[in-house]
Image (cartoon, rainbow, N blue to C red):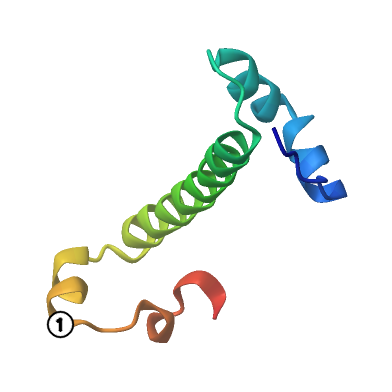
Amino acid sequence: MKTKALTQKELDLINSKSGLRILLNSKKVDLNKTLERIDNEIQLKELQGQLIELQNWVIKNQKKLSSYLKEGMPLEKEGLFGE
């Protein structure tokens, strides 16, 4: 079995709380799959944060999001996400 050397970033991810949880819940240890699941979880948290930001913007500005999505209007032009 050939193993690859892990980078410091990968080691930090595996040693994180969520990395250890994912690793310990696995029946069969596969570091590549574990790292992929950790990355997916990080991306999910970032997207959830953006969704909360979007929800707060909709509430604050009393807007209906469906009109923006239908028109394909970039939300950045409306001052959302600070870009």
Q: Position of residue 39 (x, y in %)?
A: 58, 46
Comparing 59 with 83, the one in front is 83
- Pointer 1: residues within 10 angstroms few (<14), some, or many (20+)? few
Q: Could you tell me the amino acid type at mark 1?
A: Glu
Quarter assignment of residue 34:
top right
What residue did someone put label 1 on?
Answer: 71
Q: Position of residue 75 (x, y in %)?
A: 36, 77
Comparing 19 with 66, the one in front is 19
Q: Residue at x 38, y 81 (%)?
A: 78
Is 26 rendered above or below residue 31? Answer: above
Quarter assignment of residue 73:
bottom left
Q: Position of residue 83 (x, y in %)?
A: 54, 81
Q: Secondary structure at mark 1?
A: helix
Compared across the picture, whether 61 is left or right of 13 comes to left
Q: Is residue 64 visible?
A: no
Is 52 rendered above or below residue 19? Answer: below
Compared across the picture, whether 80 is left or right of 6 comes to left
Comparing 73 with 22, the one in front is 22
